[in-house]
Amino acid sequence: RARRLAEFKVRESEQFLIQLLEATPVGIFVVSADRKPFYANLLAQQMLGRGISPEAAAGQLEDIYQVYLAGTDQPYPSDRRPVLRALQGEKLMVEDMEIRRPDVTIPVQVWAAPIFDSDGRVGYSLAAFIDITERKRTEELLRELSLTDDLTGLRNRRGFMLVAEQQLAYGKRLGESLLVYLDLDGLKQINDNYGHEQGSAAIIKTAEIMRQTFRTSDIMARLGGDEFVVLAVGTTSGSEGLIARLQANLAKYNEQGHHAYQLRVSVGVEAVDSQSTATLEELLARADQRMYEQKRKNKEQLPGGLPGRHK
């Protein structure tokens, strides 16, 4: 009778443990010491896309459960799989693993630990994992926001400098590149005369016209305020052709008469060839100086620096 009571208590505790694991809001996967799948709660089965295969031979985990190194097509290395490392007595956490199924890829964070028997030997390993898709999306959004101008969607100064240095070196092997520095003329007057909402609209429209003018492979950015920059890598168009196309796109917009003011930009261009040793900061400074020379000429043509108005 005492033995039956003890067996009943064991079964009762096992049932309680199973209920506890099933209620846990994380995937739970347990492997026995002979590397065979032993238990997976319902959430783990849903995420993995399949249940337990107790008949699986040792070493078949990699074939049964498709997990990959995040961001690659490389299966997660066997010697790094948390559930197998836990069988060696390790406790660890990884967050560079993805579960792959035909319909979905799930990035996961995994914690693993050994489960010891009464003799102190590792009898099982337990891996607990959660879906971190939303966290990855948030991290990517934050990265984009840190490199992107929120008004125009172009790169900001930081985003431009990170990419342009590398592309500039690459462009030198392709031929001449052009660094184009642009300034939206009369933004202060637009803000003062028509309000900051119209000033923001003018900045947004300038960015749209830049996208129409330059190639999608060119690196475009708003440096701040009314200043923009483009690195046209390995371009076959001369600076005069680029500026003419930009001015034509501006004129086309102005002719449509959407606003009481006209969009005008001052432009400075610095050519970069394979022999150039100037840094990106030096090139920006030169193009900026050329732009200000053009801006002075524009102010002479439009007294007070006011944007031209439609009659």
Image: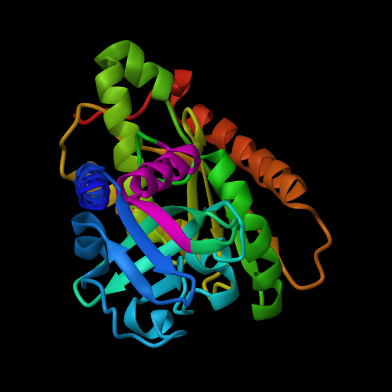
Q: Is residue 293 above or below residue 189?
A: below
- Looking at the image, residue 202 sits to the left or right of residue 264; the answer is left
Vertical order, 35 against 70 (above or below): below
The picture places residue 40, in percent across and down from the top left corner, at 28, 62
Q: Quadrant of residue 186?
A: top left
Q: What residue appears at the point 41 percent right and 48 percent down from the top-left corner?
A: 140
The percent coordinates of residue 299 (x first, y second) are: 51, 28
- Quick one: 155 or 27, which is closer to the camera? 27
Q: Position of residue 18 (x, y in %)?
A: 23, 50
Q: Magenta region: which residues?
A: 124-149
The quadrant holding residue 259 is: top left
Front position in the image: 80 or 183: 80
Residue 142 is inside the magenta segment: yes
Q: What colour scheme has been applied to the protein in the rendered image?
A: rainbow
- Residue 262 visible somewhere in the drawing: yes
Q: Residue furthest top?
A: 192
Q: Residue at x 77, y 46 (%)?
A: 282
Q: Residue furthest front?
A: 1
